[in-house]
């Protein structure tokens, strides 16, 4: 996130659903605006975002047992305001935006992180570029909804089938 002066932050807070209280966790290694996060194997994975000057491909992992952040393999593409979903023991990062080559880009690209190989792999692009979208993984598929494509807000949805490795539009 960022503060009242639009300075990016590295601070992290956690909400305890039992005590209904917030606590401060150790800060991330990088300051990040527009990052996305998911929980994989009991660890929080934070991907991309921007540090106020650059869009990031870097990825950090928080281990609640050691209470430490470590930098893990970066994504192939710098992306901010992407969506993240976890399915089948892997973490997927979809869409987002970046500024590259003097142009602002809205992304349809998707990459998947495999914790066993500790590598990111680019997979099939979504049919629509989406920044600021949301994702979930119901019924063994990844569903991505909404977002912005550079010309307007989106109400469309699409799903990824990990068996066929294809994206298809679904009713919104």
Image (cartoon, rainbow, N blue to C red):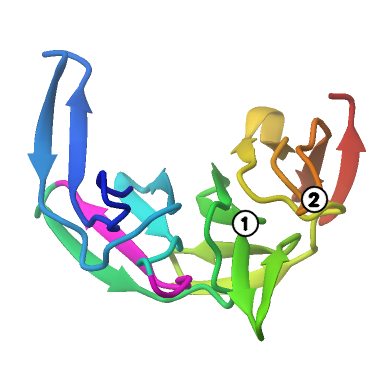
> Residue 27, image x and y in percent?
15, 56
> Residue 36, image x and y in percent?
45, 50
Residue 153 to residue 80: above or below: above
Quadrant including the C terminus: top right
Secondary structure found at label 2: loop
Q: Do we see residue 117 in this rendering?
A: no
Residue placed furthest toward the front: 5
Question: Which residue is depicted at the point 22% across and 17% down?
Answer: 17
Q: Does 26 lie within the magenta span?
A: no
- Which residue occupies the foreground of this view, 172 or 104? 104
Question: Which residue is depicted at the point 27% across and 63% down?
Answer: 31
Highlighted magenta segment, given as a residue range = 53-64
Q: Which mark is residue 80?
A: none
Q: Which mark is residue 163?
A: 2
Secondary structure found at label 1: loop
- Which residue occupies the foreground of this view, 8 or 39? 8
């Amino acid at each position: 996130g960022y503060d009242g002066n639009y300075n990016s932050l590295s601070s992290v807070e956690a909400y305890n659903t039992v005590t209904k209280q917030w606590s401060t966790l150790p800060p991330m290694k990088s300051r990040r605006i527009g990052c996305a996060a998911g929980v994989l194997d009991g660890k929080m994975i934070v991907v991309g975002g921007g540090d106020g000057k650059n869009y990031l491909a870097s990825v950090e992992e928080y281990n609640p047992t050691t209470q430490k952040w470590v930098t893990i393999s970066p994504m192939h593409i710098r992306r901010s305001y992407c969506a993240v979903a976890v399915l089948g023991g892997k973490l997927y990062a979809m869409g987002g935006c970046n500024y590259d080559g003097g142009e602002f880009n809205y992304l349809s690209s998707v990459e998947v992180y495999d914790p066993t190989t500790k590598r990111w792999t680019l997979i099939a692009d979504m049919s629509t570029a989406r920044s600021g979208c949301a994702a979930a993984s119901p019924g063994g598929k990844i569903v991505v909804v909404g977002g912005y494509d550079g010309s307007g807000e989106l109400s469309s949805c699409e799903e990824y089938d990990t068996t066929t490795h294809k994206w298809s539009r679904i009713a919104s």
